[in-house]
Amino acid sequence: MTIKKYIFIIIICLVAIGLQETYNPKEVDAFTNQIVQRGSVGDDVIELQARLQYIGYYKGKIDGVFGWGTYWALRNFQKDFSLDIDGLAGLKTRQKLVDASKFDGKWVHTQIAQGNDFTYYGGTPLSEQTRSKKGTGGKSNTGGGEAAPQQGAQNTGNNNNTPERTTTAVNVPQGFSQNDINLMANAVHGEARGEPYEGQVAVAAVILNRVESSSFPNTVAGVIFEPRAFTAVADGQIWLTPNEKAREAVLDAINGWDPTGNAIYYFNPDTATSSWIWGRPQIKRIGKHIFCK
Amino acid sequence: MLRWIAIIALAVGVAGTAAWGYKEHQEKNAILIQAENTYQRAFHELTYNIDLMHDKIGTAIAMNSRERLSPQLAEIWRLTSDSLSNVGQLPLTLLPFNKTEEFLSNIGEFTYRTAIRDLKKDPLSDEELETLENLYSQAGEIKDELRQVQHTAMENNLRWMDVQLALATEDEQADNTIIDGFKTVEKKIEGFSEGNIDSSISGTSSEDHKYENVNGTKINEEKALEYSRNLFNIKQTQDLKITGTGDGADIPLYSIAYNDGNKSAYLDLTQQGGHPITLLVDRPVKEKTISLNEGYKKAKDYIQKHNFENMELLNSSEYGNVGIYTYIYNQDGVRVFADAIEVKVALDNGDILGLTANNYYLNHHKRDIPKPILSSNEARDFVNPNVDIQEEYLAVISNDLGEEVLTYEFLGILGDDTYRIFINAEDGTEEKVEKLNGKEINYAGI
């Protein structure tokens, strides 16, 4: 009797876990009314990529970021279906696309939430097009069940600032990796966390100006870790966790914002000990820092 | 009895403290050594690289077939880059060592430029050969000097940690072999740079020129403030902070800042003519309600309102809840990459969060763009036949020499990747090939 009870409880638990898992992906209706263009991120892009893949135009990963691969797929689709070839998923294009393809939103979003490797070609059973990332090599779905809830938890746990993110890729500026951005964000946070926003962009811009300059190392890491170049590196403050502001400031600097006017040095006039730094031609002061050539 | 207990307790305490202190000391030493090792590695790599570079320049000169030079020059270029990175790892910031770094990067620039050239068609000129010979002997001298420092350092067991200390304390009499050695190297190179002025390796950075597109009369602070109030969209009564730039600035600017707690804004305005160079608005951006495409329309209206004409969208990207749009100038159907502006739009309500027009004001002018000599089909023959060309434009770009050239711009696919390829519209030179990525797996989300 007691054993039966236990088994019953265990079964209930298992069912509950299973239910939770299927509730994980949110319900997604068809396209919203917005035009989707290159650089977009989100559910509309996932649907676009999935539909284009369903009819064989898109061969890349369904990751929710409208990159070049999606762009060419869309243009080829527009060409074959005699639409205007503009690379924009507008009303007409989407209508044609919806008519020509199928989209199982629940299945696709589940795959993304579970971090599976999957494709969405029409004419092939879906179960043959997915495998868990954790299972190495070409093994099919075995073991996917236990790995999936873990990954789902990680997904929500790590994206503390943007819990809505359900895509598996992100936009990055040409030539930069997220790691470069994070390293710079660390440096900016350590150096200028009390500064106004433009002051943080300015510090990031100085790092980039140094990478460009012939008298400094040619890599972001080289510039940041140059001994005695940044006090935050010397005293370990660089390893504080940067906030979202610092990251945003770094992105702006990489995307071309430079409030310093091409400065390669800066210093805090209240604490600067080196007389040499005072001799540099000064450009301007932002917050606590004086920026110079 | 009590006394004995006290004595034992104290003895244990002393022994414990001693053990703890010893352990701390050990740990500190371990860390010091680790740091020292990093410096040592960089230093020894540097001397090795310079030595190797010297050898390679030597072989390059000795080579008979000039068209085989390219790989050799590329190798030298790589070594200069490695050496520069080594220099960067040494604690020399307080020591004036930038002449040496410039020397290295000049060698790098020269070899890179010659390495990428088609040496079969356009072999090294006599002048360039002479430059190479000069660099050879100069590199030789630096090599000797550095090897000397290295030798002394090793013989006397000198530590870079001590160099760092000596430099940090700014002791005028810092009598340190390493510092002296590096100072000698720097002095030597100071002499070289004058000798190299005639050769073709003096800097030709495309960014080193006056602002081409800043005109109008000088505006006063009142006017600048009025303009910024408009731009920031705030009332007369709000307090703005305005400052001018110092004498290090490339162009005199007014910097206007504003902060009311949850929103702050910053603007750089040229004093001449009052053109906006940089605008940054900082406020919390709420959840996305408009698409990247709608943001694009906002950005377009905005730049039209601010009299940037004939701009076309080159790129748009969504980062979190903001959209970033890159525009370039289009002169009669020819894309001019240098004249770029970027606009940042909040995707919660469509507000403009930023603008940077520095490149536009720096580079933009009316250009005499010639007609292309090659036809589009002829230009396509110069592209790798495996690239599947999808789009084609005419574009003006600055090439590796910093000159502006008219090119055919092809966007094409090779394998899974998209490439932007620029073919000179006059002679078919492959000016630039770029792999376009722009997105990456989200490491944080997997």
Image: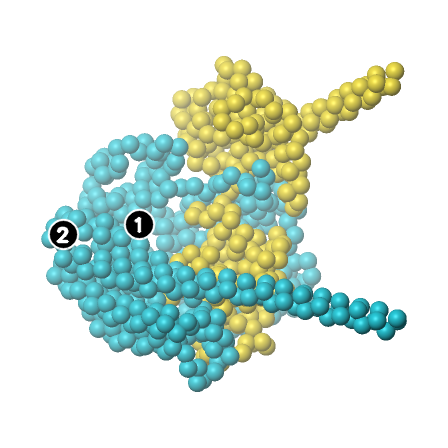
Residue A193: x percent and y percent?
Answer: 61, 62
The three-letter amino acid code for the residue at tag 2 is: Arg
Q: Which mark is residue B66?
A: 2
In front here: B241 or B1? B1
Q: Which residue position is annotated with label 1? A: B396
Q: Identify whether B433 is placed above or below B105.
A: above
A86 sits left or right of A115 in the view: left
In front here: B428 or B46? B46
Q: Secondary structure at mark 2?
A: helix
Quarter of the image for the C terminus of chain A: give it.
bottom left
Could you say which quadrant of the image residue A196 lies in?
bottom right
Give the colour of chain A.
yellow
The mark that comes first in sequence, 2 or 1, is 2
The chain holding disc 1 is: B
A61 sits left or right of B14 in the view: left
B98 sits left or right of B164 in the view: left
Give the colour of chain B.
cyan
The three-letter amino acid code for the residue at tag 1 is: Val
Q: Identify whether B281 is placed above or below A155.
A: below
Residue B82: x percent and y percent?
Answer: 35, 57
What residue sits 69% from the left and 27% below the top?
Answer: A21
In front here: A113 or B435? A113
Residue A275: x percent and y percent?
Answer: 49, 80
Q: Secondary structure at mark 1?
A: strand
What residue sits 36% from the left and 72% below the top?
Answer: B155
- Any part of residue B162 in sight: yes
The extreme front residue here reads B1
The chain holding disc 2 is: B
What residue sits 65% from the left and 46% below the top?
Answer: A161
Which one is in front in this view, the residue at disc 2 or the one at disc 1? 2
Quarter of the image for the N terminus of chain A: give it.
top right
Could you say which quadrant of the image residue A140 lies in?
top right
